[in-house]
Image (cartoon, grey):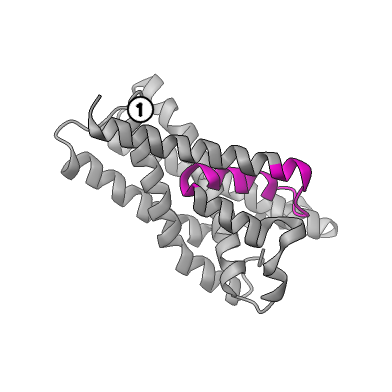
Amino acid sequence: MDTLTIISIIALAFGLVSSLVIIVDVTRYPQQMAIMNVVWPINGWFLGPIAIWTYFKWGRIKAKDIDREDNRGSGAQVFTSTSHCSAGCTLGDAVGVPFVALTGIAIAGSVLFAHYIVEFILAYIFGIIFQFFAIYPMNKKAGATSAIKEAIKADTLSLLAFEIGMFGWMAIVHFVLFTEPPKPSDVSYWFMMQIAMILGFLTSYPANRWLVKKGIKEAM
């Protein structure tokens, strides 16, 4: 077993354990915003112990330091909003990978381009769904159509910013780091995906900060 495989197994194990820790806790202490019960465990998968720390610091209902930072655009609010965006994108990307692998599709003769297109579409769909369930429960009187429009307005820029980081890393993995890129059946592929999600989180953070400060995106 090579070094990269060992590192990949350890990183994935940390992610899985982190998700499970959060799942157990949100089961006991459900979030006021129901979609966050899904968001925090997904972030546990790629942020690992950082997700656990931020969840207990800002996310857990009975340990909310976020209430002490109620000014719009605070670090806690932006981090949580970025987590929300990243979770939707991550879920879409995670669903897209096996779809491309199982169907064997290629675009312009490139499997990487197929991953880009399929995963972008699914990430966008899941991102809007996640945003819808953040907006609609707070303003049901405006109706579902209005909530969808607001979700598109709130999530499009942050999703594009996330995919820039993620797709950029995928290109580096595909063209620079490996002579033969890992396949979805390899644990190292999913370790590379963890890194891609972290970079997507980082590139989407400034966009989420701007959206929250401008009031375009709901502070969470």
Instruction: Find the residue positioned furthest to the right.
Output: 141
Image vertical order of residue 210 relative to residue 131, above or below:
below
Give the residue pinned by disc 1: 184
- Does residue 114 appear in this view? no
**x and y percent of residue 26 in the render?**
72, 45
Q: Residue at x 48, y 55 (%)?
A: 159
Residue drawn at (51%, 50%) of the image: 49
Q: Could you say which is closer to the camera, residue 57 or residue 175?
A: 57
- 196 relative to 78 in the view: left or right: left
Q: How many labels, in total? A: 1
What's under tag 1, amino acid-wise? Pro
Where is residue 13 shown, x and y percent of the image? Answer: 46, 34
Callout 1 secondary element = loop
The residue located at (59%, 61%) in the rendering is: 81
Q: Splitting the image into 4 quarters, where does residue 57 fall? A: bottom right
Furthest residue in direction left, as rendered = 179
Point 57% across, 67% down: residue: 78
Magenta span: 25-48
Residue 45 in view: yes
Q: Is residue 40 magenta?
A: yes
